[in-house]
Image: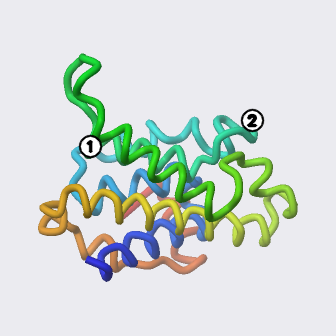
Amino acid sequence: MEYLIQLIADKAQNLFITKQLMCSEAVLTVLNRSLSGGLGPGLDIQLASGLSEGIGGSGCSCGALTGGILSLGLFLGREKPGFMNNKTIMNASKELHDNFRNRFNSTCCRVLSKNVKHGSKDHYKNGAEIVRFSSEQTGRILLRKKPELISSADYIFLEQSDSGIKSALKKLSNSFT
């Protein structure tokens, strides 16, 4: 299980640091694709795209955290209305939030990135650490609550890592694996 969690964190971090995906997109996309979440190609990116840079660039809730919450909902969320069937997702989301806040002392994007210039190398390095932590924690929660997901893991997807040049070529051709 630990190897799988580290692969998830590595892949999300790689997709962010190579500028293929934004923070929220990287977290949701990696968890969806690696654990067979069911969102079709590109839908994971679409769903998470407005959450990047603290909800649409507003600097509020961190996109890596909100991408993690979306991922938890994808796998643990309730499937029908009613107030009595939401304890699993609520507890998992609170756990992720609390772990995140304890690690970084904030969940606010503008606070998390206040010491780095937006778009700089340091900005991406800082964001990559946050993306890594969020995807790792989200993966850990998911696999603890749904250990059967381990058997559906896509190791081929997870073990692919892109260099800066390879990611630039992918972006030019609009392909994503």
Name the quadrant containing residue 23. bottom right
Residue at 54%, 52% in the rendered image: 98
Q: Nearer the viewer, residue 138 or 54?
A: 138
Give x and y (percent) for residue 46. 45, 38
Q: Is residue 89 above or below residue 117?
A: above
Q: Is residue 155 left or right of residue 159?
A: left
Give x and y (percent) for residue 84. 24, 23
Residue with the mark numbered 2? 58
Viewer-side label of 1, 2: 1
Q: Is residue 47 above or below residue 41?
A: above
**In the drawing, what numbered circle is on residue 63?**
none
Name the quarter where the C terminus is drawn: bottom left
Count up the numbered dots.
Answer: 2
Q: Nearer the viewer, residue 42 or 107?
A: 107
The way the protein has been coloured in the rendering is rainbow
Q: Amino acid at mark 2?
A: Ser
SS label for mark 1: helix
Name the quarter where the N terminus is drawn: bottom left
Give x and y (percent) for residue 112. 75, 56
SS label for mark 2: loop
Number of other residues with Cα within 10 Å of mark 2, as a class: few under 14, some 14 to 19, many 20 or more: some
Q: Is residue 80 above or below residue 134?
A: above
Number of other residues with Cα within 10 Å of mark 1, as a class: few under 14, some 14 to 19, many 20 or more: some
Residue with the mark numbered 1? 76
Residue at 87%, 62% in the rendered image: 115
